[in-house]
Image (cartoon, rainbow, N blue to C red):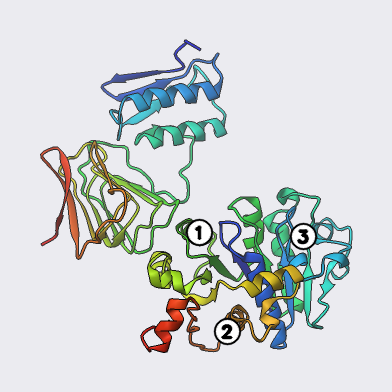
């Protein structure tokens, strides 16, 4: 029996889909059997980020409504044998399915896969309820912005109400030089408010935009700093203890400070 | 729309609310809001009894009515409405002394609200967007960053204590104060807020 993980955030645009794609691909790279599920019905993106858009025939709603078998809707990744995607329907809406149906589907997938990773839509309505039904673990993605942290906090509360305890935090798009100048929330600020364990910190990185647009998750790029951050997150999920990345401050001041041995981060 | 949508009547047993049957529900809520807003928390902490029979409300409408009334610090008494799972049952018997204390060992997060008749002790943080309303004192053994309303039934002796008192808004009885705009120097240690000379004042706890 595998483990189901939902990637959620409350706020939109913080990087849920990118995180889902990278964690899924990263776990598959370690040889795990992984299925990604796009629960963002009506606004599907995960297929695009994975570069699998043109292979969709059936989707999640087709499976739930019995128009096809589960296996028919699952798309095998073009790079890895052991990675699959169950895409969302684009022409339907969130209320096309309900949490009970979703839970049954996840349970079915867990029998075959070691990890089932669900990409949750933004918001706290039906889509959120569907996506979190049947999850064993929640990963909350937040950026270092007051609004994103506020929404993340609300999500932790709502998950508790659903008896989904002990979520993990991924801080996305942190900019070390802004943190140093005091213009951005620090990691500690965010942990103080949310009071949940940190799973990883992903730096703001241009290469992730490029890889996302190309449909090639950054985790496969050995040179990318954000890719490294995701590889670490994946290994932490697998139970390894990995220290958090020393984030390079690539501003001129940051480099100067490193040269004279002052700046640590 | 000149017709008054409702009547709030006071007598020995408390306030009662009557809604005429011929007005649109949205308009009723609208006028209720205007009325309560103009009363400046005069009604805060009171219990309103909905007089039924004149007009039957649908369950959904009742929930809206209840939440509107709650927004202004009042409670609606109806037997049919169930308490929301996130909130704590409210004692409406005003004759009881504020002796009871609710202990919560958790972080109160954005969107969560605790209402209690008595004192509230939180072992953990109260985050921005969370709300604590009680008739007695509030003690937060952690950081208070949300909204706290102590002495909501008009008890001006009520106090708010926190290890880190950085509330969005602080209310004691009918008094309201908010955090100053812009950057605020962080409190160094435990602080307590109480009313002195008709103003909420914060002082270091010793």
- 3 or 1: tag closer to the N-terminus: 3
Quadrant location, the C terminus of chain B: bottom left
Left or right of B63 on screen, residue A135: right
Q: What is the C-alpha distance between the residues marked 3 and 1?
A: 25 Å
Q: Nearer the viewer, residue B13 or B137?
A: B137
Q: Is residue B29 above or below residue B105?
A: above
The secondary element bearing badge 2 is classed as helix
| Residue pointed to by mark 2 | A232
| Residue pointed to by mark 1 | A148
Counting from the top left corner in percent of width and height, residue B112 is at 43, 52
| Residue pointed to by mark 3 | A88
- 2 or 1: tag closer to the N-terminus: 1
The secondary element bearing badge 3 is classed as loop
Residue at image x 71%, y 79%? A25
The answer to whether dots 3 and 1 both sit on one chain is yes
Q: Tell me which corner region of the image, top left, top right, bottom left or bottom right, holds residue A99.
A: bottom right
The answer to whether dots 2 and 3 both sit on one chain is yes
Left or right of A107 on screen, residue A189: left
Residue at image x 55%, y 33%? B59
Q: Is residue B116 visible?
A: yes
Counting from the top left corner in percent of width and height, residue A136 is at 60, 71
Residue at image x 69%, y 63%? A103
Q: What is the C-alpha distance between the residues marked 2 and 1?
A: 23 Å
- 2 or 3: tag closer to the N-terminus: 3
Few, some or many residues within 10 Å of mark 2 (<14, 14–19, 20+): many
Few, some or many residues within 10 Å of mark 3 (<14, 14–19, 20+): many
């Amino acid at each position: 029996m595998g483990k189901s993980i939902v990637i959620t955030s409350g706020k939109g645009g913080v990087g849920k889909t990118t995180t889902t794609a990278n964690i899924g691909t990263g776990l598959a790279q370690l040889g795990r059997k992984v299925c990604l599920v796009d629960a963002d019905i009506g606004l599907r993106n995960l297929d695009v980020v994975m570069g699998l858009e043109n292979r969709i025939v059936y989707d999640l709603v087709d499976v739930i409504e019995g128009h096809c078998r589960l296996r028919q809707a699952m798309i095998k990744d073009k790079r890895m044998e052991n990675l699959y995607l169950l895409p969302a329907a684009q022409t339907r809406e969130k209320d096309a399915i309900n949490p009970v149906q979703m839970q049954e589907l996840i349970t079915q997938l867990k029998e075959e896969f070691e990890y089932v990773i669900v990409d949750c839509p933004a918001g706290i309505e039906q889509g959120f309820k569907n996506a979190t039904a049947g999850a064993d673990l929640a990963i909350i993605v937040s950026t270092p912005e007051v609004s994103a942290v506020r929404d993340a906090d609300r999500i932790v509360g709502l998950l508790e109400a659903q008896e989904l305890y002990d979520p993990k935090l991924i801080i996305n798009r942190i900019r070390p030089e802004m943190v140093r100048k005091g213009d951005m929330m620090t990691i500690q600020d965010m942990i103080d408010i949310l009071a949940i364990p940190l799973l990883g910190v992903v730096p703001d990185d241009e290469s992730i935009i490029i890889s996302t647009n190309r449909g090639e998750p950054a985790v496969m790029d050995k040179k990318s700093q954000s890719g490294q951050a995701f590889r670490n997150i994946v290994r932490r999920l697998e139970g390894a203890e990995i220290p958090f990345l020393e984030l390079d401050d690539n501003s001129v001041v940051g480099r100067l400070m490193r040269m004279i041995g002052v700046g640590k981060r | 729309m000149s017709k008054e949508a409702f009547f709030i009547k006071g007598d020995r047993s408390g306030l009662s609310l009557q809604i005429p049957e011929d007005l649109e529900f949205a308009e009723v809520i609208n006028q209720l809001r205007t009325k309560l807003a103009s009363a400046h928390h005069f009604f805060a902490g009171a219990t309103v009894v909905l007089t039924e029979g004149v007009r039957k409300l649908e369950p959904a409408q009742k929930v809206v009515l209840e939440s509107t009334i709650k927004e202004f610090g009042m409670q609606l008494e109806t037997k049919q409405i169930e308490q929301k799972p996130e909130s704590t049952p409210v004692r409406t018997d005003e004759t009881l002394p504020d002796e009871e204390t609710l202990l919560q060992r958790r972080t109160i997060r954005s969107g969560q609200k605790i209402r209690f008749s008595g004192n509230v002790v939180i072992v953990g943080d109260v985050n921005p967007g969370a709300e604590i309303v009680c008739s007695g004192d509030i003690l937060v053994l952690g950081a208070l960053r949300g909204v706290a309303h102590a002495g909501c039934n008009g008890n001006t002796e009520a106090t708010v204590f926190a290890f880190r008192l950085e509330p969005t808004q602080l209310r004691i009885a009918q008094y309201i104060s908010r955090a100053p705009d812009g950057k605020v120097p962080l409190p160094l240690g435990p602080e307590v807020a109480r009313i002195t000379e008709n103003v909420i004042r914060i002082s270091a706890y010793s």
